[in-house]
Image (cartoon, rainbow, N blue to C red):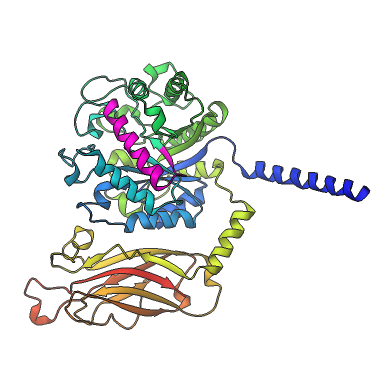
């Protein structure tokens, strides 16, 4: 009897310890996210080091499917792999039409002429990343004409797009969350913009409540601090998000959370937006205070995402207005806001079980995909018909391909060299090489015939050349024979796919 009583006491103590540990591991208040722009290994590592829980990234339709049924997966594949390596939740925004899908000019973001084209794109993405993406944001700020093909905002039309995309996501990945597009905060009601509160109400009247799991929002602070009262400045402040919440409650959707998928303050407002400008110190203080207010007052706000953190190559291409909101300056150096957030970010603390699963997975995994079998890269200086793809990066000549692969430290603990396998099509010259973290692998890629067939090649990679985390893989093409260099064929033309690092 005493033994049984002690067993019950022991079990109760164990449960109490587990509950306490769970409470300690679970962050209080909303998760803290960062909206990356053309995220690379550097941006994802910086996001994790700062303590962000979630990354929001745009998967541009026009970049992934520039031509109907021609898919370019390298960038999204690398973002998904990088987020998983760093233990970050990934939320993906799906918009930016390709030229073939809409009659609107590419200078605006336009809904497709045929909703089925967009639904097919959404389904392809959701199926490819099934179980690896937490949520999908369906379009961006459709209450602005600039994001709706230059046409007046149409909440009923957007609801049709949202509902069709909702079905596509749920059929491909039932566990993924569907997030409605974040609406731009505006008091305008004209052909250029529609008040986001009225737009949301029209969406809900059209039945949008059944077509999203999470309401997206863009509660920017403009030039005002995050504690600015709700009624101040005609509602153009962060507290405007309460107006959206009220409409959710009024339509019986109080159980659905809100995610702020963009928010922030700019240090470089331009033109009509110059009054939005705050100082670097204010930007840092306001972002911290915004998180604190959300923790204190808005339990229904599950995610607070700061706009933005660009990849290194994206910085020089960003408009000044975008960089004004960024957590890094135009030189890529951290702004004070980044250090301020690092001090308060709750982060995503993995449980012991998650860490154990990662360690076991790293010990068992033997193959690390650098470039998928269905992603073809064409290097050289000549455009050919199928089965050739357009030149990599839309550059001519395109002489260098670069990729990244994430390898956990546990996988590198075992002795022995590694291998890099790839499939090649039509190597003509002896000066094409693969590089790993800036070191050239030997020998050069072997030549083959002109039949347009794929051949497999395997190279040895010294284990000492690899490092935990992101590893850079590159391929460079050489010039053709001197006798040909005054013709259009200055560089060798070849294609690669199915690049795998393994041990």
Residue 330 visible (yes or no): no
Give the residue furthest to the front: 171
Compare residues 353 and 316 and report the one nearer the observer: 353
Where is residue 136 shown, x and y percent of the image? 39, 42
Q: Which quarter of the picture shows residue 137?
A: top left
Query: Is residue 149 covered in magenta?
Result: no
Q: Judge left or right: residue 273 versus residue 408.
A: left
Residue at the (48%, 57%) spot, across then down: 85
Where is residue 411 shown, x and y percent of the image? 53, 69
Q: Is residue 419 above or below residue 388?
A: below
Q: Main secondary structure of the magenta part?
A: helix
Count of labels in the image: 0
Q: Is residue 358 above or below residue 298?
A: below
Residue at the (26%, 56%) spot, across then down: 71
Residue 170 visible (yes or no): yes
Residue at the (44%, 44%) spot, across then down: 174
Residue at the (41%, 28%) spot, across then down: 209
Where is residue 502 shown, x and y percent of the image? 44, 73
Q: Is residue 28 above or below residue 494?
A: above
Q: Which quarter of the picture shows residue 374?
A: bottom left
Query: Is residue 169 covered in magenta?
Result: yes
Where is residue 46 shown, x and y percent of the image? 46, 52
Q: Which quarter of the picture shows residue 277?
A: top left
Q: Judge left or right: residue 95 versus residue 500.
A: left
Compare residues 211 and 108 and report the one nearer the observer: 211
In the rendered structure, which segment of residues is drawn in magenta?
Answer: 156-178
Give the residue furthest to the left: 487
Q: Judge left or right: residue 447 versus residue 330.
A: left
Q: Is residue 483 above or below residue 276?
A: below
């Amino acid at each position: 009897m005493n033994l049984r009583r002690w067993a019950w006491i022991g079990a109760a103590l164990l449960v109490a310890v587990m509950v306490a540990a769970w409470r300690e591991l679970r962050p209080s208040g909303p998760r803290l996210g960062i909206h990356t722009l053309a995220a690379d290994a550097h941006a994802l590592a910086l996001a994790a080091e700062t303590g962000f829980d979630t990354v929001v990234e745009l998967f541009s339709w026009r970049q992934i499917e520039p031509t109907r049924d021609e898919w370019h997966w390298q960038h999204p594949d690398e973002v998904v792999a990088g987020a998983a390596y760093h233990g970050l939740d990934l939320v993906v925004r799906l918009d930016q039409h390709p030229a073939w899908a809409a009659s609107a000019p590419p200078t605006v973001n336009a809904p497709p002429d045929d909703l089925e084209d967009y639904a097919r794109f959404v389904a392809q993405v959701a199926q490819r990343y099934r179980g690896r993406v937490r949520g999908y944001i369906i379009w961006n700020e459709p209450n602005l004409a600039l994001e709706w093909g230059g046409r007046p905002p149409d909440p009923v039309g957007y609801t049709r797009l949202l509902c069709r995309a909702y079905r596509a996501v749920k059929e491909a990945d039932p566990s993924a969350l569907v997030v409605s597009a974040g609406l731009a905060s505006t008091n305008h009601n004209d052909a250029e913009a529609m008040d986001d509160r009225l737009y949301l109400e029209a969406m809900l009247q059209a039945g949008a409540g059944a077509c999203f799991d999470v309401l997206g929002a863009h509660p920017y602070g403009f030039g005002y601090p995050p504690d600015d009262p709700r009624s101040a400045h005609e509602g153009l402040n962060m507290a405007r998000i309460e107006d959206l919440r009220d409409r959710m409650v009024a339509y019986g959707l109080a159980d659905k959370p809100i995610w702020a998928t963009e928010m922030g303050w700019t240090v470089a407002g331009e033109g009509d937006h110059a009054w939005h400008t705050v100082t670097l110190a204010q930007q840092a203080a306001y972002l911290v205070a915004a998180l604190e207010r959300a923790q204190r007052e808005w339990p229904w706000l599950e995610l607070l995402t700061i706009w933005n953190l660009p990849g290194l190559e994206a910085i020089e291409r960003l408009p000044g207005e975008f960089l004004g909101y960024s957590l890094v300056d135009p030189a890529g150096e951290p702004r004070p806001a980044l250090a301020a957030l690092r001090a308060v970010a709750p982060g995503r603390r993995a449980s012991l079980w998650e860490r154990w699963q990662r360690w076991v997975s790293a010990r068992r995994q033997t193959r690390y995909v650098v470039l998928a079998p269905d992603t073809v890269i064409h290097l050289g200086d000549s455009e050919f018909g199928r089965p050739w793809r357009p030149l990599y990066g839309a550059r001519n000549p395109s002489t260098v391909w670069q990729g990244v692969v994430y390898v956990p430290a546990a996988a590198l603990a075992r002795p022995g060299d590694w291998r890099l396998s790839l499939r090649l099509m039509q190597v003509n010259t002896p000066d094409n090489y693969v590089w790993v973290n800036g070191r050239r692998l030997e020998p050069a890629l072997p030549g083959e015939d002109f039949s347009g067939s794929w051949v497999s090649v395997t190279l040895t990679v010294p284990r000492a050349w690899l490092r935990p985390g992101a590893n850079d893989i590159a391929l460079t093409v050489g010039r053709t024979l001197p006798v040909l260099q005054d013709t259009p064929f200055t560089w060798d033309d070849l294609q690669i796919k199915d690049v795998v690092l393994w041990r």
